[in-house]
Every structure is written in C-alpha cells, then in structure tokens.
C-alpha cells in the first residue's frame, strides 16, 4: 500500500498557533500548505473517512483569525449539515467536532438553532445548506468550504464565486465522486489550472485503512447492496472512481450515452421550426423550462432556464426575449392551481400576460411518476442537447436519483427531491406531452410543429 507523503507539521500562523490537541494528518498537509501559501481555490477529492470536513473546519478557524470576516461551510442540505458536522462527535475525544475546531475560549457567542459561531476576533462562521445559499443575509463571505460538492447544487458556486472574486476570498471543494457530474468537471478543470490546488487521494494512498480493512469494506458493500451496486459503491467511496456513476440515478446511463455519441454539442436554433417548451412550476422551489425543436426523428434541445423567487411575468419576459416562435407550452397539472389573493389559475395569469397555447397535463395517477420517468427515459435517445445553454439541465438529468430508504436498506419507489428535481420534472412533462418517442411517428395531434 502506497502512503501519501508525510509533509512537515504546518504552523497555524502568528495569530493562532497549533494548540487544542489537533494537527493535520500527513496526507492532509499538502492541502493545508497550499492554503497557507496563499492558494485561493482548492479541490480535494478524498476517500470516505479521510477527514475532509475536519481539516477544513480547523483551517477556517485559523483563517478567521488571520483575516476578520464571514466564513461559510456548506453541505448539500441544511438538515444534513446539522447531522454530519454540527452535531458530529469525535469518537476518540468525545467532543463535538465544531468544539474542537472552534474551541469555546475563542468564541464570543454561539447560536445553536442557526449553526452560527461568533469568534472573539470578530469573525463569524456558519454551517449552511447549499440548497438555500441565496437566502443568507448579512456580510458576504470571504472564505467558503463546499462539502460533499458532488451532491450539492452547482448554482451555489455560481452565486458565491463573484463575491469571492471581488473580495479576494478563498473557496475549498471537498467530496468523494458521484459520477461524472459538475464536481468531476470542476476537478478536471482545476488539475490544469496553476492557480488551483487539485488532489485526488484514494484509500490505497492515505494509509487510513489497512489492506485487510479495505477488503472487508468491499465485501460488506457487496453483501449489502449486491455485487454490481456494491462494487460501484466501494470504488466510488474508497477508490474515488468517477466512472461508478450516480448510484440510483434514473437517467445517468442515457446521458452518458448521449455524451459518448456526440449528442451533447452545439445545437443552434433553427428559425424555420417552431419551439416547444416544457415546464416544472415552482413557488418556493425553482421553475425549470426546456426549449426543444422536434425535427423529424430528432429532438433538438436548444435551451434551458431555471430560476426561483420570481413571478410568472419574469418567465414570460424571458420567453419573449428569445428569437423563438412557440408552438406549445407544456405545463404540469399544478398549472391549474389558483394563486392566493387573485382567484385566478397560474395558467390564466400567464395568458393575461400574453402567453398562448398553454397545455396543462392532467394530474397523474398513483403510478404516474413511474410512467413519466419511463417516458422520459425513452425520449432521451432521440435528443441532441446544446452543451452550453442546457448545461444546468443536463446536470439535473444526470444526477436525478431514487431516494434511498435507510431503514429498509434499499431504494424507495420515489425520486429524491433536491436541486436536480426541477430540471428532471420538466423533462418528464416534455415526455408526457405527446412528443416523438422511438418507434412513434412525428406528432399527429400538433401538425404545426413543423415550419413556421
């Protein structure tokens, strides 16, 4: 077993020397030294139980004493953040990990319900979910850790990046792989960028586990999840393999095939043909819209938008900005829901703003989600995606997955609701809207899908 280089013990800087019975492990020191040397961007793809959060919590405490400001530690969901970090206890010491990283003598105050710490030096640190990154108020951050980034909403980095760029702040991304999604793209880009620190460490490199322990883990995974899924999970969690795919994913194989076939490329709008949109309507959640042109047997997917916190008037304006001639707008069944205070349905409000040809799908039966997912899966091999305009939607489809039932140790029959749901649900609406499917002729119900 090859061990990572055991680098010298780092300093925690003049403002905060290394006390509190903690120091980075040997293989963690490359990341620490890179940050200490002034790197503003870092990505660490480390295996499970490599101490990713631990080292970043301690680094943040040091950074907070070097430069007073606001610091965030993001996990994919706020509920997960509380369980995995805020309430996590180090079994070797019996102390909460946040109490080890941010010792009580250094604190001016703690708000348990907000997972918020104010330090005596004037800095603040907060544990938050990347599912509500844009709802945070107060001073903008100057240091951010994206934990479990492979499962996080990639829009969070798009939102925070210009803030850190403006104030010369830093960002660290830590995760184990979940297929070739946005996190894999980030790591691939960082490897070739001298301004970034990028590192992948498998369990065979760090020495955290013996060969015998790893063999036991592999057998346990295969016994618990079956030979195929178990092997994939082991390779993902301990060998940091990006090829294992997103476990429980509905459409990952079809998206991978589209990529391999060259069907994720540049797909310009053809002005001779009408455009169809398919929607997932959110109120508290985002609204997502696909733009497609069915031309013969090919579904040309030319555009995708997603936003939240705005009314239907914003989406109507966005549609009007685009140089498209629309044949039809496919809405989910809740388009017939009435809005509070108006007495009008969402469809009626949109029509009042000038939208035409809105078709609201019927409310699905109890097995409607399964039927829709099957239809969505069948539609994917006919599709050619614009890689730039549809990048966010493609990420949603690739990472959309079934919910894991921890009690029963199997996948549930329902999707997991997270940032991927909106793009996947609008794609399902598209598939349920009488479009071209394999073995099915061009649409007969709507012959005006052709030339404008």
Image: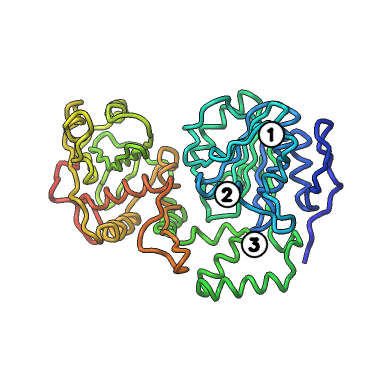
User: Which residue is rendered at x = 41% and y = 54% of the image?
Assistant: 416
Q: Quadrant of residue 110?
A: top right
Disc 2 + disc 1, Cβ < 8 Å? no
Q: Which numbered dot is residue 239?
A: 3
Alpha carbon distance from label 3 to label 1: 27 Å
Q: Which residue is mark 1?
A: 40
Which residue occupies the foreground of this view, 92 or 252?
A: 92
The local secondary structure at tag 3 comes to helix
Q: Earlier in the sequence, mark 2 or mark 1?
A: 1
Disc 1 crowd, CA 10 A, few/some/many (<14, 14-19, 20+): some
Q: Position of residue 109 (x, y in %)?
A: 65, 33
Q: Vertically, is 289 above or below 80? A: above
The local secondary structure at tag 2 comes to loop
Q: Position of residue 120 (x, y in %)?
A: 72, 29
Q: Which residue is mark 2?
A: 148
In the picture, measured across the screen, residue 2 lies left or right of residue 277, that is right
Q: Position of residue 166 (x, y in %)?
A: 61, 23
The local secondary structure at tag 1 comes to loop
Alpha carbon distance from label 2 to label 3: 16 Å
Q: Position of residue 152 (x, y in %)?
A: 51, 46
| 2 or 3: mark nearer the eye | 2
Disc 3 crowd, CA 10 A, few/some/many (<14, 14-19, 20+): many
User: Which residue is rendered at x = 25% and y = 61% of the image?
Assistant: 367
Q: Earlier in the sequence, mark 3 or mark 1?
A: 1
Disc 2 crowd, CA 10 A, few/some/many (<14, 14-19, 20+): many
Alpha carbon distance from label 2 to label 1: 19 Å
Disc 3 + disc 1, Cβ < 8 Å? no
Q: Vertically, is 438 above or below 174? A: below
In the picture, measured across the screen, residue 344 lies left or right of residue 122, that is left
| 2 or 1: mark nearer the eye | 2
Which residue occupies the foreground of this view, 116 or 64?
A: 116
Q: Vertically, is 140 above or below 249? A: above
């Amino acid at each position: 077993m090859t061990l990572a280089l055991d680098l010298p013990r780092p300093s925690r800087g003049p403002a905060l020397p290394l006390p509190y019975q903690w120091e980075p492990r040997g293989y963690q020191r490359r990341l620490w030294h890179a940050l200490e040397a002034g790197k503003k961007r870092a990505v660490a793809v480390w295996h499970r139980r490599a101490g990713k959060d631990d080292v970043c919590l301690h680094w943040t405490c040091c950074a907070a004493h070097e430069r007073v400001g606001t610091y965030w530690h993001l996990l994919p969901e706020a509920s997960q953040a509380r369980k995995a970090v805020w309430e996590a206890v180090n079994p070797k010491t019996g102390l909460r990990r946040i109490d080890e990283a941010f010792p009580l003598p250094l604190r001016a105050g703690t708000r348990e319900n907000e997972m918020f710490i104010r330090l005596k030096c004037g800095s603040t640190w907060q544990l938050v979910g990347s599912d509500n990154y844009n709802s945070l108020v107060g001073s903008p951050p100057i240091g951010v850790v994206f934990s479990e980034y492979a499962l996080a909403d990639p829009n969070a980095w798009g939102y925070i990046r210009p803030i850190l760029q403006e104030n010369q702040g830093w960002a660290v991304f830590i995760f184990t792989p979940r297929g070739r999604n946005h996190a894999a793209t980030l790591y691939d880009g960082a490897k070739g960028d001298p301004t970034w620190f990028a590192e992948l460490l498998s369990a065979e490199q760090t020495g955290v586990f013996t060969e015998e322990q790893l063999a036991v883990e592999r057998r346990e995974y295969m016994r618990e999840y079956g030979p195929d899924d178990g092997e994939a999970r082991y390779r993902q969690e301990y060998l940091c393999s990006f090829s294992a795919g997103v476990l429980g994913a509905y459409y990952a194989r079809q998206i991978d095939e589209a990529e391999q076939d060259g069907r994720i490329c540049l797909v310009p709008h053809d002005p001779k043909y009408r455009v169809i949109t398919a929607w997932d309507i959110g109120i508290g959640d985002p609204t997502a819209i696909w733009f497609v042109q069915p031309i013969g047997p090919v579904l040309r997917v030319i555009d995708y938008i997603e936003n939240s916190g705005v009314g239907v008037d914003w989406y109507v304006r966005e549609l009007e900005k685009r140089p498209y001639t629309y044949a039809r707008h496919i809405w989910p069944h809740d388009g017939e829901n009435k809005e509070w205070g108006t007495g009008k349905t969402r469809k009626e409000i949109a029509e009042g703003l000038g939208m035409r040809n809105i078709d609201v799908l019927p409310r699905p039966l109890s097995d409607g989600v399964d039927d829709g997912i099957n239809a969505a899966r069948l539609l994917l091999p006919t599709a050619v995606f614009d890689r730039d305009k549809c990048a966010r939607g493609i990420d949603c489809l690739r990472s959309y997955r079934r919910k894991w039932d921890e009690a029963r140790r199997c996948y549930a029959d329902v999707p997991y609701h997270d940032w991927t749901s909106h793009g996947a649900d609008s794609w399902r609406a598209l598939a349920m809207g009488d479009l071209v499917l394999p073995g099915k002729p061009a649409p007969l119900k709507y012959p005006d899908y052709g030339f404008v």
